[in-house]
Amino acid sequence: MTMAYHRYHRIDTKIVRIFNTYGPRMRLRDGRVVPAFIGQALNGKPLTVFGDGSQTRSFCYVSDLIDGIFKLAMSDFHEPVNMGNPREMTIKQFADEIIRITGAKSTIEYKPLPVDDPKCVNRTSLAQRKFLAGNRTSVSKKELRRPSNIFGNRWLRYVNRLNR
């Protein structure tokens, strides 16, 4: 509908598709994979992977998302843009990385894949590559190494509760 509006009225429009953003002030139990895996690992529980873990996701740190949205807003690009990290990883790889980073003794527990789980890979389109060529993410998954970067001061309270 936005593209039709853009074409018909010849006005500036932007379409952003946001994928798996993580960053400061996330809630441990908000249902997204980053806090879910970290919370499970820190509690010594198995990390829940739905399906066989081969489905891929693009993880993007919030500052990169904001930067990308701003650059898109200032551009003359009008095609839809998937905002995410160009490097995708499988959910299984991500679970292994969280276990490694947290030093947890957790295992991975596989459960049936929900029917509404996205099956496709979130690759960028050819049109997007034109816009994205000069707009790369600057924050890597190293930000996951310090959960305080994601959960802020609540992280310290959480760790203190675990250590009682």
Image: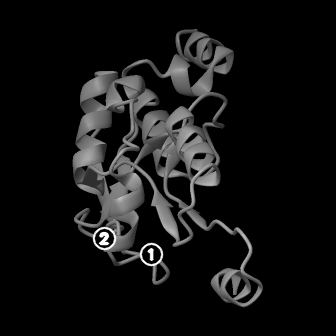
Position of 22 with respect to 130 (left or right) is right
Residue at 33% across / 77% down in the picture?
Answer: 120
Quadrant location of the C terminus in the rendered image? top right
Question: Between marks 1 and 2, how big is the CA–CA gap?
Answer: 9 Å
Q: Would you place residue 114 above or below residue 32 in this image?
A: below
Q: Give the residue displayed 60% in from the left and 25% down from the top.
A: 151
State which tag comes first along the sequence, 1 or 2.
2
Percent position (x, y) of residue 59? 41, 47
Give percent across and percent down for residue 100: 24, 28
Query: Closer to the camera, 5 or 148?
Result: 5
In the rendering, at what x and y percent does residue 52 appear? 23, 67
User: From the viewer's perspective, is 137 left or right of 81?
Assistant: left
- In the displayed structure image, the side of residue 10 where residue 90 appears, left or right: left
Q: Which amino acid does label 2 sit on?
A: Gly
Q: Which of 70 and 148 is in front in this view?
A: 70
Q: Quadrant of residue 67?
A: top right
Query: Dividing the picture into quarters, in which one does residue 98 lie?
Result: top left
Mark 1, other Cα within 10 Å: few <14 / some 14–19 / many ≥20: few
What residue is disc 1 on? 117
Q: Of the numbered discs in the image, which one, if any, rests on residue 51?
A: 2
